[in-house]
């Protein structure tokens, strides 16, 4: 099968340019389903906490493909495409539940939690007539399963045999950051869902971009969750497709803040909350990290904003829309005050949160803006410099976007610049 | 003519409160919004998905008029979101007096948004679950919990529901 993208070159070798086509080209979107979501990458599915007992299941997505993830009787985790092996009907019809067998509503074909076909009604016919052929072999009609691996309670799946082990796929720098947060059992606090009218990759750009965070989000800036004058670091794994943005409230000087925001209306040192009690929450870790955004290629983000911890799964719903599916959690050992603090700080995040609501708007604005640009038009990503893509100790940078696009272009088979 | 019971006056006053709340939001008079609550009133927006699963994470959780005023200030001065007109349709209101003299009030709502170019979309449906206190200034929300059925939020929630 010929891939459209191999006929296109990426415009610059250092990924300081991104063709706007990637946000509105239907051929590219179709190729992503094949090369990214069915390709050699680990796709986030759910947390182990959500399927802790035998028979527990949730429906998740790999790209747009609905996948059932369930805990088997022997406590392993299995995942399969949510489509019957007979005529393809959606098999599991509720988003979550508990069952040790899955029966298709259409003709009652029945499967176990590992996806093996257990029973076919009327296999031997009725009154000696009809039925399946004598050589019909149930063992050859299992559900389409995925490889599943977990890391620190996070469940991932892949369709490809070529995907390296999850441990290696994440790499040491990303694992270390996951270890920091997932150092104790989770307690699920809830879910948020947003339908954002933008191509899914615009959200990945957004959360890899510390440059916007202190400019679009006044709340961040004014209340000291995030300012570019804080101690900040942006770093990536070996492929540069995953990244971490870390901000710690260390070493900040008010004079630097004043210089950085000279002439910018968004920063208002006089701005005071009438009720600042939502900031009056004890930190969960002693390291003074106020903001940590970790993205794992292709489409999941783990985040800390103050005392809130969330998984954000970017689920494409067509070329121009995605669902942002938030899993908001605390820790099993949180006391009542810690839980209450996390509920108060839910006001920062989610579709109505002081900080996060603006990211939905940013995606909408970019999608509208790029939709009818010339095919050769490109975005400019030079904050932090051109040339080699490298980790950097500043928040005044867009380098993690360039790392994402580099890994994206390689994965999608865009020819490197200079190739024929 | 039907004889009005002793409950008629407070029930009328509560209905005026509900109508005025809706008018306040639809007319973009947000500065009045916190005044519909008692000073330590609670305003919560919850996803029906979380409510049905017993999960506590709220979409919005304010527990003082001060926090509500902070939201209004942020909406006016700071937050970036799409300009829209809104219309609330509220129906099916049920009012019951509680033993402590407050009232439990539940209603169904639909909120439509219309863009600057005059295109209208159904933004959100759900239910209000209120605890209304009778104060010397008339009925006020001690708590207004908004449970949204449209928890697959159409992009974002900016102004109060």
Image: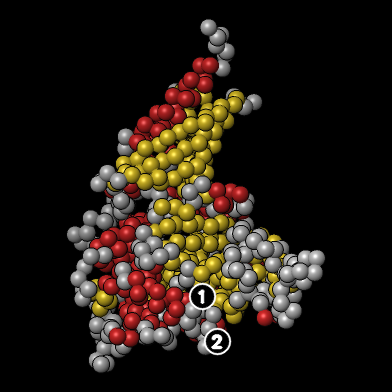
Looking at the picture, the colour scheme in use is secondary structure
Residue that mark 2 sits on: A161
Q: Residue at x 29, y 85 (%)?
A: A7
Q: Residue at x 21, y 76 (%)?
A: A376
Whether residue B149 is visible here, answered yes or no, is: yes
Q: Residues within 10 Å of mark 2 (few under 14, many from 20)?
A: few
Disc sitting over residue A218 in the figure:
none
Considering the numbered disc 2 on the image, is that residue within a helix, a strand or a loop? loop
Q: CA distance from mark 2 to mark 1?
A: 13 Å
Q: Residue at x 65, y 69 (%)?
A: A70
Q: Nearer the viewer, residue A371 or B72?
A: A371
Q: Earlier in the sequence, mark 2 or mark 1?
A: 1
- Residue A326, percent from left and from top: 50, 61
Considering the numbered disc 1 on the image, is that residue within a helix, a strand or a loop? strand
- Residue A168, percent from left and from top: 53, 86
Residue that mark 1 sits on: A43
- Residue A197, percent from left and from top: 36, 59
Q: Residue at x 30, y 89 (%)?
A: A416
- Residue A231, percent from left and from top: 37, 72
Q: Is B154 left, or right, of B29 in this rendering?
A: right
Q: Is A98 left, or right, of A408 in this rendering?
A: right
């Amino acid at each position: 099968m010929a891939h459209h993208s191999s006929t296109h070159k990426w415009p610059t070798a250092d990924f300081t340019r991104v063709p706007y086509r990637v946000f509105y080209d239907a051929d590219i979107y179709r190729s992503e389903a094949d090369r990214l979501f069915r390709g050699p990458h680990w796709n986030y599915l759910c947390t182990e906490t959500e399927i802790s007992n035998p028979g527990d299941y949730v429906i998740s997505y790999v790209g747009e493909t609905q996948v059932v993830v369930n805990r088997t009787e022997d406590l392993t985790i299995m995942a399969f495409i949510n489509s019957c092996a007979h005529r393809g009907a959606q098999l599991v019809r509720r988003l979550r539940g508990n069952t040790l067998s899955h029966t298709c509503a259409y003709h009652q074909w029945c499967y176990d939690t590992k996806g093996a076909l257990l029973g076919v009604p009327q296999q031997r016919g009725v009154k000696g007539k009809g039925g399946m052929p004598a050589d019909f072999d149930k063992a050859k009609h299992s559900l389409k399963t995925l490889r599943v691996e977990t890391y620190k309670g996070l469940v991932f799946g892949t369709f490809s045999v070529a995907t390296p082990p999850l441990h290696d796929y994440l790499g040491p720098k990303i694992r270390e950051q996951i270890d920091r947060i997932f150092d104790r059992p989770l307690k699920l606090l809830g879910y948020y869902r947003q339908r954002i009218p933008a191509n899914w990759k615009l959200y990945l750009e957004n959360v890899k971009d510390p440059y916007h965070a202190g400019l679009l989000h006044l709340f961040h800036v004014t209340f000291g969750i995030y300012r570019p004058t804080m101690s900040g670091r942006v770093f990536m794994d070996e492929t540069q497709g995953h990244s971490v943005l870390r901000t710690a409230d260390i070493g900040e000087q008010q004079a630097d803040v004043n210089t950085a925001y000279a002439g910018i209306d968004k920063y208002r040192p006089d701005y005071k909350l009438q009720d600042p009690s939502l900031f009056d929450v004890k930190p969960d870790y002693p390291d003074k990290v106020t903001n940590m955004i970790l993205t794992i290629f292709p489409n999941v983000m783990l985040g800390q904003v103050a005392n809130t911890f969330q998984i954000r799964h970017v689920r494409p719903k067509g070329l121009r829309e995605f669902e942002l599916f938030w899993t908001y959690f605390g820790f099993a050992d949180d006391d009542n005050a810690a839980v209450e603090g996390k509920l108060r700080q839910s006001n920062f995040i989610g579709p109505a949160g002081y900080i996060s609501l603006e990211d939905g708007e940013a995606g909408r604005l970019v999608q509208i803006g790029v939709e009818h640009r010339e095919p050769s038009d490109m975005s400019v990503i030079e904050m932090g410099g051109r040339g080699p893509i490298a980790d950097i100790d500043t928040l005044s940078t867009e380098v993690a976007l360039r790392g994402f696009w580099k890994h994206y272009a390689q994965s999608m088979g865009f020819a490197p610049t200079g190739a024929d | 003519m039907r004889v009005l019971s002793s409950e008629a006056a407070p029930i009328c006053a509560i209905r005026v409160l509900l109508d005025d709340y809706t008018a306040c939001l639809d007319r973009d008079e947000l500065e009045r919004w916190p005044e519909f609550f008692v000073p330590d009133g609670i305003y919560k927006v919850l996803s029906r998905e979380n409510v049905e699963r017993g999960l506590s994470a709220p979409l919005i959780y304010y527990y003082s008029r001060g926090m509500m005023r902070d939201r209004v200030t942020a909406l006016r001065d700071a937050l970036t979101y799409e300009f829209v007109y809104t219309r609330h349709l509220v129906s099916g209101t049920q009012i019951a007096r509680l033993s402590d003299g407050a009232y439990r009030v539940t209603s169904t709502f639909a909120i439509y948004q219309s863009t600057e170019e005059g295109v209208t979309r159904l933004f959100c449906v759900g239910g209000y679950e209120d605890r209304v206190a009778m104060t010397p200034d008339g009925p006020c929300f001690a708590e207004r919990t908004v449970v949204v059925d449209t928890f697959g939020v159409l992009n974002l929630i900016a102004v109060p529901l």
